[in-house]
Amino acid sequence: MIQAIDLSKSYGQHEVLKHISLTIPAHQVVAVVGPSGSGKSTFLRCINGLEIITSGSISVNDHLLQATNKKKERQKIIHAIRQDTGMVFQQFNLYPHKTVIENVMEALIVVKKQSKELAKKMATELLKRVDLQEKEGVYPSKLSGGQQQRVAIARALAMEPQIMLFDEPTSALDPELVGEVLKVMKELADEGMTMVIVTHEMNFAQNVADRILFMADGQIIEDAEPKAFFAHPVTERAQKFLAKVK
Ligand code: ADP
Ligand code: MG
C-alpha cells in the first residue's frame, strides 16, 4: 500500500532522509519513533506530498510519485495520493470560526461536493465515532485539546481515507487528555485502518502497533515487531533512546 524506494530528501545541502526503502502493507499499524530531528515528520510528509522528495520514489495505493516527475505530473499524483490519505498533526488546526460539525462538514462539501444534508449526516456519524456528538454546535475554542484533536481526526476521516498519517497527535496535550485521543486511534487500528503514527507514546506503540520503525539521522535503523524492539533493541542508538524515554 505504501512503498518507498531509495527515497531521499534534502533541504539544500542537508540530507534529512537518506535512501529509505520500505513497504507498508494494507491494514498495518506502524509506529515511527526516534530522537527529535531524525526525520520522522519529513518522512510522513513525503508520503502525502507535503514535501517534495529529492531522489527515489514513493508509491501510495499505486500512485507512484518519483523525484523525476515534472511539476504538473507531480501535482496530479499528489492530488490522487491525498484523496486516499488523512493526516493529523500535533496542532489541531481547526477552523476557529466554524463549529465542530462545520469543521467536519467542510471537506465533504468543498472537496467531495456533497449536499449540505448528506454532509451533515456523515459528520454526525463521524462525531459519534470520536465520542463528540454532544459538541457538534460548539466552537473549537470551547473544547479541550483532547476534544479538538478528536474533531481533527473526525475531519480527516470524513474524506474516507484508506491510510491515516499521524504526526505526534498527542504531544501538545495535557497528560490527562492523551488517553482519549489514543483510544480513538486504537479503535481505528482495530477496524483495520492502515496507519503510520509518529509518536513518543511508547506504551501505545508497544500495545497497538504491528511494527516499529526506529529512525535516527534520516535513516530507519531498526524495523521490528514491537515486542522485539522494546525488549531487545539491536542498535546502541535505540538502546540509548529507549533508556531515556521509558
Ligand atoms: P523529527 O520529526 O524526527 O523531529 P524532522 O523531520 O522535523 O524531524 O526534521 C529532520 C531534519 O530536517 C531536522 O534537522 C530539521 O531541522 C530539518 N528540517 C525539517 N524541515 C525543514 C525545512 N522546512 N527546512 C530546512 N530544514 C528542515
Ligand atoms: Mg517531528
Image (spheres, grey):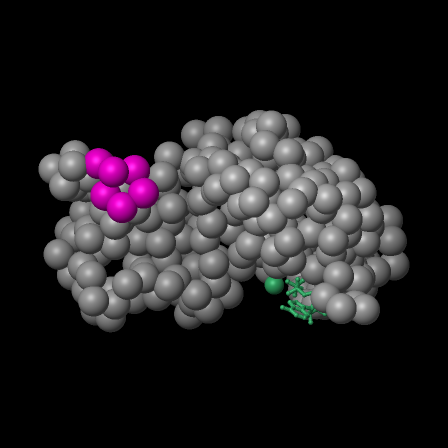
**Residue at x-position 60% and y-position 28%:** 62
Residue 1 location in percent, x, y?
61, 29
Q: Which of 234 and 45 is in front in this view?
A: 45
Q: In this view, does 164 lie above or below 95?
A: above
**Residue at x-position 71% and y-position 46%:** 67
**Residue at x-position 32% and y-position 43%:** 111
**Residue at x-position 12% and y-position 37%:** 117
Residue 30 location in percent, x, y?
62, 41
Quadrant location of residue 185? Answer: top left
Residue 188 location in percent, x, y?
43, 37
Q: Nearer the viewer, residue 2 or 172?
A: 2
In the image, residue 78 lies in the stretch drawn in magenta: no
Residue 108 location in percent, x, y?
27, 41
In the image, residue 110 lies in the stretch drawn in magenta: yes
Q: Is residue 35 above or below residue 57?
A: below
Q: How many dots with numbers?
A: 0
Q: Is residue 128 visible?
A: no
Q: Can residue 64 be seen in this view?
A: yes
Q: Is residue 85 above or below residue 135?
A: above
130 sits to left or right of 235: left
Question: The C terminus is located in which quarter?
Answer: bottom right
Q: Ligand 2 lies in which image quarter?
A: bottom right
Magenta: main secondary structure: loop
> Which region shows up in magenta?
109-114
